[in-house]
Amino acid sequence: MNLLLPIIFALLSGLAMSIQPGINSILGKNIESPWLASTISFFIGTIALGIITFVLGEMKSTAFIVQTIKEQPWWIWIGGFLGAIVVTSSLVFAPKIGATSWIALFLLGQVITSILLEKWGVLGFPEKPISIQKMVGLGLLIVSAWLVKKG
């Protein structure tokens, strides 16, 4: 599999995640509500994704969606809620602790969670043992987050 496209999109996602808290924070200050700012952010994102879904020809019928909702476990529908936590946390707390500290801690939380998800092979991730290399990498991330916060 060609890894260039996933690598480029991962880097662009990191770039977007670094910019998003600042943009949303300014929006939240200007409209005087972090919750409304998050709502607007998700609304704009929903419109963008709707357009992309339509252009790609991936729209589904209402009947298909309702049937899917009935057949799937409840917990697969909480991704948007988790995203709302991330967006609101970033726009409320990144300005308080700084963009670099927030991103470093965000990344640390992601890596810890990812290691555990892969250890047990849950949520569709392949099962991968916790290796010495992963623990060293995690340790370096912890030190990095601490150094970034101190600096």
Image (tube, rainbow, N blue to C red):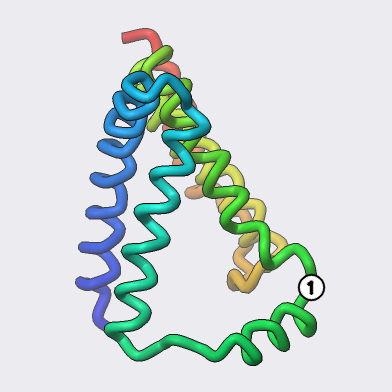
Q: Residues within 10 Å of mark 1 (few under 14, many from 20)?
A: few
Residue farthest to the top? 150
Q: Which residue lies at the image location 48% right of the left edge and 49% below the top edge?
A: 133
Residue 120 in the image: above or below residue 51 = above
Which quarter of the picture shows residue 118?
A: bottom right
Give left or right: position of 13 versus 124: left
Q: Which residue lies at the image location 41% right of the left edge and 88% below the top edge?
A: 58
Q: Position of residue 101 (x, y in %)?
A: 39, 21
**Near-viewer residue (74 or 3):** 74
Q: The residue tagged with tag 1: helix, strand or loop?
A: loop
Which quarter of the picture shows residue 31?
A: top left
Which quarter of the picture shows residue 49?
A: bottom left
Residue 23 in the image: above or below residue 145 = below
Asked whether the viewer can see residue 144, the reply is no
**Residue position marked by numbered label 1 in the rendering:** 73
Amino acid at dot 1: Pro
Asked whether the viewer can see residue 44, the reply is yes
